[in-house]
Image (tube, rainbow, N blue to C red):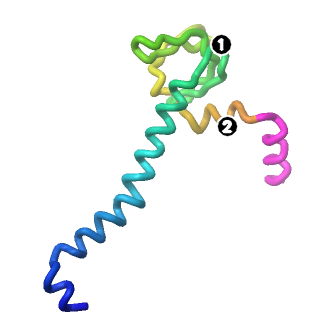
């Protein structure tokens, strides 16, 4: 083993890079891809939550600048599609049956 490390001193660095790739870089790339796909699949009438916590319903979509107009109780606000939280919006739109099962498990 020592002979291998003496012949290839860069081998531990390659191992560290491989571990970093599979545990840090690859999951981040997958998450980014999923968020982009989610933003492209938005449609009028979808209930969403922004990353800042604003709740509303999509009123209008603009493909030119990747923005959307969200209708809230306070009025209509224009947001970038990237400002919409994928996780929170999916939880908001879960079917009621799944939410009640989750509540049963918690109590």
Residue ranking furthest to the bottom: 2
What's the mark number on residue 7?
A: none
Q: Position of residue 63 (x, y in %)?
A: 46, 13
Provide the residue span drawn in magenta.
95-107
Percent of width and height locating residue 74:
61, 11
Q: Residue at x 83, y 47 (%)?
A: 101
Identify which residue, 54 or 57, lies in the foreground: 57
Work out whether 23 lies above or below 47: below
Q: Is residue 61 magenta?
A: no
- In the image, 24: left or right of 34? left
Q: Is residue 49 left or right of residue 98?
A: left
Residue 102 location (% of width, % of height): 79, 47
Q: Position of residue 9 (x, y in %)?
A: 15, 78
> Dividing the picture into quarters, in which one does residue 19 lie?
bottom left
Residue pointed to by mark 1: 73
The 10 Å Cα crowd at callout 1, few under 14, some 14 to 19, many 20 or more, is: few
Determine which residue is flagged by label 2. Answer: 91
> Going 57% across and 14% down the picture, which residue do you hit?
70
* 13 relative to 63, above or below: below
Q: Residue at x 56, y 9 (%)?
A: 60
Q: In which quadrant will I find the N terminus?
A: bottom left
Element marked by disc 2: helix
Quarter location, residue 32: top left
Asked if marks 2 and 1 touch (Cβ < 8 Å), the reply is: no
Is residue 50 toward the left or the right of residue 80 in the image? right
Would you call the spot at circle 2 few (<14 residues within 10 Å), some (14-19), or many (20 or more)? few
Q: Nearer the viewer, residue 18 or 49?
A: 18
Which badge, 2 or 1, comes first in the chain's sequence?
1
What distance separates the C-alpha of mark 2 from that of mark 1? Answer: 20 Å
Q: Does the magenta stretch mainly form a helix, a strand or a loop?
A: helix
């Amino acid at each position: 083993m020592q002979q291998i490390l003496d012949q290839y001193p860069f081998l531990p660095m390659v191992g560290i890079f491989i571990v970093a790739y599979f545990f840090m870089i690859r999951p981040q790339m997958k998450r980014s891809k999923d968020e982009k796909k989610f933003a492209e699949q938005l449609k009028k009438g979808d209930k969403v939550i922004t990353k800042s916590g604003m709740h509303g319903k999509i009123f209008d979509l603009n493909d030119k600048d990747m923005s959307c107009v969200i209708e809230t109780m306070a009025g209509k606000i224009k947001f970038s599609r990237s400002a919409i939280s994928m996780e929170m919006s999916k939880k908001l739109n879960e079917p009621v049956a799944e939410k009640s099962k989750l509540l049963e498990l918690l109590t």
